[in-house]
Image (cartoon, rainbow, N blue to C red):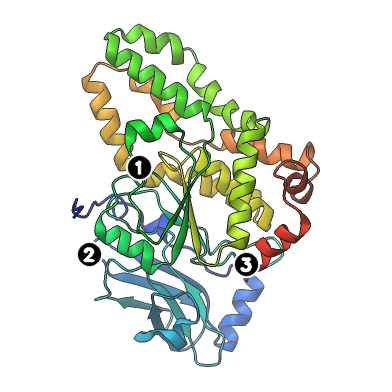
Amino acid sequence: MRDRGWTSVAAVGLASMLALTACGSSSTDTDDASSSGQVSHLSVDRGDAGAYTLSWDGAGEATVFASTSVTDPSENGREVATGDGAATVDGLDPIDRWYFEASTGDGTGDIASTRQFFLQGAHNVRDMGGFTTKDGHTTAWGKVFRADSLTELTDEDDAALAAADVATVVDYRGKSEIAKNGQDQLPASTKYVNLPVLDKNTEALSNAIQKALKTGNQQVMQDMLGDGKARQIGDEGFVDQLNSPKAMAAYGKTLELIANSDGALMYHCTSGKDRTGMMSALLLGILGVSDEAIIDDFVASNTYNREHNEKTYKYLEGKGVDISLVKPLMEQRPSQIKPVLDAVHNTYGGWDKFAHDVLGLDSQTLTQLRDKMLV
């Protein structure tokens, strides 16, 4: 049995990152909802001890339901609390992923969950649901997850993936990464798909660190990453992927799998920030999410990876490594992903044309993807 004990990476300082609006709307919509008593803007936080704090807009008392199924918790779940704009829910199984609905009983309940999918053996795992699109739709909860390495998942994590109906996992790591860091530890029922994507950020960081540690010559790292080279690699790496047919084919195949999968799909790389960040930006862009929200999701990896990064920095400092050389490749900046979004709009003719010409998606697949992922 695999057993590592609970990690605390998610709970520390993530309250603001875990709270999100399930169905965003304008201030006018909020005023209308409040005056009519309808629930809107449900947000969910999970605290250190596993309790959930919920808040929402809307006048009058609402009933809160919880379910491990995202489909209609008020029907398929159980009543766990009542409140006027807020409630606290405790005593839910921490292994399961919980979806909440707050409803006034008129059939207009709002559904949400935490952005983070809490696992013991991974820390940058997130639900791609709950994003508001520019035309007023919301990305569906519980259909697609982004993640970091899944090589240290416990039996409890496997149970959580199975309970969340994660039917397919897409791994963007190459053979050498897998050989070095290990295979994904997944439930037997989960289909594993390896779609390797070459990532200059990961490659440059790994090469520099390994050479510096092996030779004991820190000048090697300075020569490879110093004088702004690391930041340049980081800022150019994502646009470079646009010119890689193999990378674009891998992302396009992932979108096809999402569109055609009966269950949920999870995609990941090593740290869940570069290749996974690129895939997330493409998915959200095609679904109609704003550039601002896409950038916010991209840089959010800094929060979810913070504890892991701090441990890495401490270890490297102990080996005499100048941390300022590696930070530009371990932390995310808007300047990395914004040029990709600008290129889609200004060079490739918009998201539909980009999806067709670069990712190889036909109109039927795009329709299926949006039908599945938008509510």
Numbered circle sitting on residue 286: none
**Callout 1 secondary element:** loop
**Residue at (41, 39) in percent of width and height:** 270
Q: Is residue 65 visible?
A: yes
Residue 271, image quadrant: top left
Q: Residues within 10 Å of mark 2 (few under 14, many from 20)?
A: few
* Picture coordinates of residue 83, whole percent (x, y): 38, 84
**Residue at (34, 49) in percent of width and height:** 123
Residue denoted by label 3: 372
* Picture coordinates of residue 265, whole percent (x, y): 50, 58
* Picture coordinates of residue 53, whole percent (x, y): 35, 71
Residue denoted by label 2: 49
**Residue at (76, 47) in percent of width and height:** 356
Kind of residue at badge 1: Gln
Earlier in the chain: of badge 2 and badge 1, it is: 2
Q: Nearer the viewer, mark 1 or mark 3?
A: 1
**Callout 2 secondary element:** loop
Residue 347, image quadrant: top right
Say if 230 sits above or below 88 in the image. Answer: above
**Callout 3 secondary element:** helix
Left or right: 239 with respect to 142?
right
Residue denoted by label 1: 183
Q: Nearer the viewer, mark 2 or mark 1?
A: 1
